[in-house]
Amino acid sequence: MREKHVYYAKRTTLLISCCAIALIVMGLFGCTNDNPSQSNPNGIIATAPDPEGSNYTITQNRYSLILGGVDCQDGSSDDYCGIDVTVRDGMTTVVDAPCELRWNVSDYPNRTICSASDGTTVSLSGGVYHVYATTDAYGVAHFRVSGSYTSSTGCGGGEGNSGTPRKVSLYVESVLQSSAFCNVSVADPNGSGGVNSADLSIVVADNACSNYYSRSDLNADGSVTDADEDVLEGIIFHGGSPCSCGE
Ligand SMILES: [Ca+2]
Ligand SMILES: [Ca+2]
């Protein structure tokens, strides 16, 4: 009896070993095909689509996220400030795409964002700003924010990097599109009375200063010139920033 038990045990072990080898062979040579980009049983070759967020064409209405004033009645942010981003995939505009502008406070210090409108949202965490907007039916994400400078102004040692003025990253659908998308400048450097001639005088003073101040580089070209004064005058005459936040 004992020899018979040993015989059956050996047969069972042999059977299990054969099954294991068969499974390994099937695994090695692939008995299933779950990759849609490979040929299917009909012999049709399907190309895998591009992952979302890749190969987009990005355009923008300016190279600076400008912090300006608000409408005194409804508190909405000035559309001559902020920044607009258009997302296309080939010739097609990309609708409902979540977009984000992200930067380190250390790159653009002494700025505050005090309000946002048109669906724009803002968070500040661990010294990093995150501003979110979603593309509309025309593929445009309107980053509508208002804000001001939080420190005293004057001609001192300068602030910011004139060699690489654009340090804001743009993400679309969580995919990095550019790490040098725009800068963060300020149309309301004194933080009161909206954007008016008092703010222009600060930009004029920064223009005259020998050191670079990114707060007044409203076209983000790495220097403060008459062209930046022109941008600020356009904001003043447009009339969309008559008040600062909370006024
Ligand atoms: Ca002001
Ligand atoms: Ca400039």
Image (cartoon, rainbow, N blue to C red):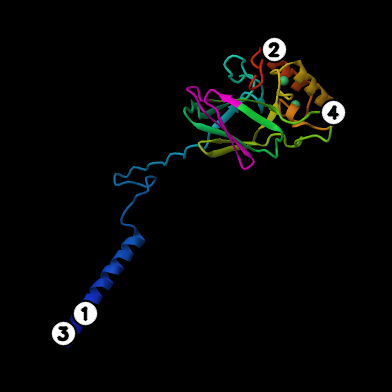
Mark 1 Cα shell of 10 Å, populated few (<14), some (14-19), many (≥20): few
As drawn, 51 above or below 8:
above
Q: Is 118 within the magenta?
A: yes
Q: Main secondary structure of the magenta part?
A: strand
- Give x and y (percent) for residue 69: 65, 20
Q: Secondary structure at mark 3?
A: helix
Residue 4: assigned label? 3
Amino acid found under the numbered disc labelled 4: Cys
Residue nearest the observer in this picture, 63 or 48: 63
Identify the residue under disc 2: 237
Q: Quadrant of residue 1?
A: bottom left
Mark 1 or mark 3, which is nearer the start of the sequence?
Answer: 3
Mark 1 or mark 4, which is nearer the start of the sequence?
Answer: 1
Provide the residue span drawn in magenta. Answer: 115-140
Q: Is 131 within the magenta?
A: yes
The answer to whether any part of residue 221 appears in the image is no
Confirm or deny contact between disc 2 and disc 3 (CB under 8 A): no
Q: CA distance from mark 4 to mark 1?
A: 93 Å
Left or right: residue 189 compared with residue 48: right
- Give x and y (percent) for residue 17: 28, 73
Q: CA distance from mark 2 to mark 1?
A: 95 Å
Quadrant of picture, ligand 2: top right
Mark 1 or mark 2, which is nearer the start of the sequence?
Answer: 1
Identify the residue under disc 1: 9
